[in-house]
Image (cartoon, rainbow, N blue to C red):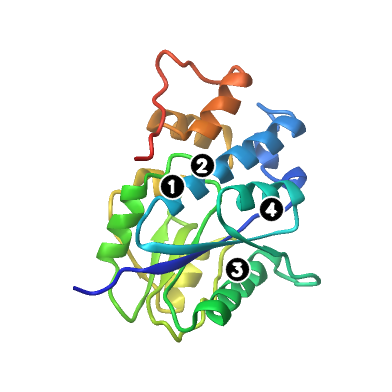
Amino acid sequence: MRSHTVHAVMAVKHIGRAKSRLAEVLTAEQRGQLVLAMFADTVVAVTAVPEVFSLTVVTPDPRVAARAGELGAHVLAEPTGAADPLNAALAAAARDVRDRYGPVALLAVQADLPALRPAELTELLTAAPDGARSVVIDHTGTGTAALLVRDPTAALDPRFGADSARAHRAQGAHPLPGHWPGLRHDVDTPADLAAVRALGVGAYTATVLREFGLTDPRSDPVRTVC
């Protein structure tokens, strides 16, 4: 049986600059708390997958770095001066992983997937072909939730950002068709927030939403990680 082992990488920008499209429902302070909570729930889900050997997080934000370290991730400072900070951060994380572990498979995952279930990542790793580049397209049909490179010598070469699904497909990534709503649903808008609430978010996100008065503990499901 082939090994599904991968090394995961994430990038998170300054909390104070994140999720501006949620301004109509959350204050700047609340958006920062939500970003940190969603990140923590994503880390918990990713690291609960036995096939994920390590997680490396790149961030310039000390609060994110502290939380990542508390949750067992390896933390790197964000590279400075990059024209494309997100993809430069992910590429730096990928190089760091291979400097430490040698030629390994790489999985880049969005950091705002509060409804992500470990089983979804497990199914992704089972479905993705060896020696290939695979992409999980997000719920909008244009973005990227995850990028998997199963060729241990190929560069990650991330193209996250506007229309990233098309960019990743253009570089040879095969779209994976699994029904993985928690993996495909990142949060940028109030509608996204309502959607992940319906799916069931992790404990960190559920706590802050309850504090904000945006969730009903009697009816909103809560994601559990076994």
SS assignment at label 3: helix
Give the labeled residue for mark 2. 41
The residue labelled by disc 4 is 65
Q: Earlier in the sequence, mark 2 or mark 4?
A: 2
Pointers 1 and 4 in contact (C-beta within 8 Å): no
The amino acid type of the residue labelled 2 equals Asp
Circle number at residue 210:
none
Q: Residue at x 33, y 50 (%)?
A: 120
Report helix, strand or loop for mark 4: helix
In space, the residues marked 2 and 4 are separated at their CA atoms by 15 Å
Q: In the image, residue 203 lies at what x, y percent?
A: 49, 32
Q: Position of residue 172 (x, y in %)?
A: 40, 78
Q: Reading the chain from its start, which is encountered first: label 2 or label 3?
A: 2
Dot 1 or dot 4, earlier in sequence:
1
Q: Nearer the viewer, residue 49 or 210?
A: 49
Residue under pointer 1: 45
On the image, numbered disc 3 is attached to which residue? Answer: 90
As drawn, is 133 to the left or to the right of 54?
left
Nearer to us of marks 2 and 3 is 2
Quadrant housing residue 210? top right
Question: What is the crowding at mark 1: few (fewer than 14 residues within 10 Å), some, or many (at least 20)?
Answer: many
Give how far apart the Cα atoms at labels 1 and 4 are. Answer: 17 Å
In 3D space, how far apart are the residues under numbered discs 2 and 3 (Cα atoms)?
Answer: 19 Å
The kind of residue tagged 1 is: Ala
Which residue is located at x 49 percent, y 83 percent? 102
